[in-house]
């Protein structure tokens, strides 16, 4: 069962990301964090993993080291380690996109099961959003992403392969199904 810690993390995540919206959509960013936590919980997340799902972008997007310290103070080392494992950089300005993604992909096969669960839930929520938005917007969707169409498709395919190296799960299988659907739709539109 979830305790007051989860409620506190939900409030903290809402406060941290209050002014953020999803790329190009106008949707409040908290919807993504709730979606990732929901997917993680549906795939067996414990409370620390569910809290990390809510906070998985906090270090990267909302304050770096100071936010890491606050997460550790409020929610402990386990949550902090999971969030760290889901963070592709805490440096401002961020390193080049491709370099960050390659480094992140490379660490997934050896990451903890908790990091893989939260990361895969994150990628699945993002891939579902891409699929839904692509159906509406077509190729103009790719303008939202630093990697463009080719880079974004490469990244999600590479993430599927990285998760598979560590072992297939129903969550990884679902991510692959969504990525295949995005790949198929985007190749059909030529």
Image: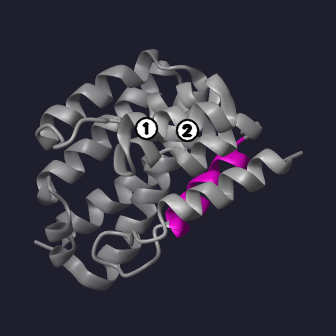
Place of residue 113 in the rendered image (x, y in percent of width and height, measured from the top left): 59, 24
Query: Which residue appears at 55% of the width and 63% of the height?
Result: 15
Q: Secondary structure at mark 2?
A: helix
Q: Position of 33 compared to 146: left or right? A: right
Q: Residues within 10 Å of mark 2 (few under 14, many from 20)?
A: some
Q: Quadrant of the C terminus?
A: bottom left
Q: Which mark is residue 66?
A: 1
Q: Is residue 67 above or below residue 131?
A: above
Q: Name the residue at the right extreme.
A: 1
Place of residue 115 in the rendered image (x, y in percent of width and height, measured from the top left): 53, 29
* Residue 140 visible in this rendered orientation of the protein: yes
Range shown magenta: 30-43
Q: Is residue 133 above or below residue 163?
A: below
Q: Which mark is residue 103?
A: none
Relative to the observer, which residue lies in front, 68 or 172? Answer: 68
Specify whether residue 32 is painted magenta: yes
Place of residue 101 in the rendered image (x, y in percent of width and height, measured from the top left): 23, 36
Relative to the observer, which residue lies in front, 149 or 76? Answer: 76
Relative to the observer, which residue lies in front, 75 or 87? Answer: 75
Place of residue 55 in the rendered image (x, y in percent of width and height, measured from the top left): 54, 47
Q: Which mark is residue 70?
A: 2
Marks 1/2 in contact by CB < 8 Å: the verdict is yes
- Spatial separation of the CA atoms under disc 1 and disc 2: 6 Å
Specify whether residue 173 is painted magenta: no
Query: Which residue appears at 66% of the width and 44% of the height?
Result: 51
């Amino acid at each position: 069962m979830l305790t007051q810690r989860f409620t506190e993390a939900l409030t903290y995540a809402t406060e941290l990301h209050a002014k953020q919206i999803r790329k190009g959509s106008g949707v409040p960013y908290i919807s993504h964090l709730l979606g990732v936590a929901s997917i993680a919980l549906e795939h067996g997340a414990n409370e620390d993993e569910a809290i990390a799902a809510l906070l998985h972008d906090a270090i990267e997007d909302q304050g770096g080291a100071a936010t890491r310290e606050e997460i550790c103070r409020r929610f402990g080392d386990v949550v902090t380690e999971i969030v760290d494992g889901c963070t592709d950089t805490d440096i401002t300005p961020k390193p080049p996109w491709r370099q960050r993604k390659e480094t992140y992909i490379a660490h997934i096969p050896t990451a903890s099961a908790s990091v893989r669960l939260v990361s895969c839930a994150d990628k699945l929520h993002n891939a579902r959003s891409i699929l839904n938005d692509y159906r509406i917007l077509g190729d103009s969707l790719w303008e939202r992403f630093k990697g463009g169409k080719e880079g974004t498709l490469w990244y999600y395919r590479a993430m599927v392969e990285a998760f598979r190296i560590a072992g297939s799960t129903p969550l990884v299988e679902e991510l692959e199904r969504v990525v295949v659907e995005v790949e198929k739709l985007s190749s059909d539109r030529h």
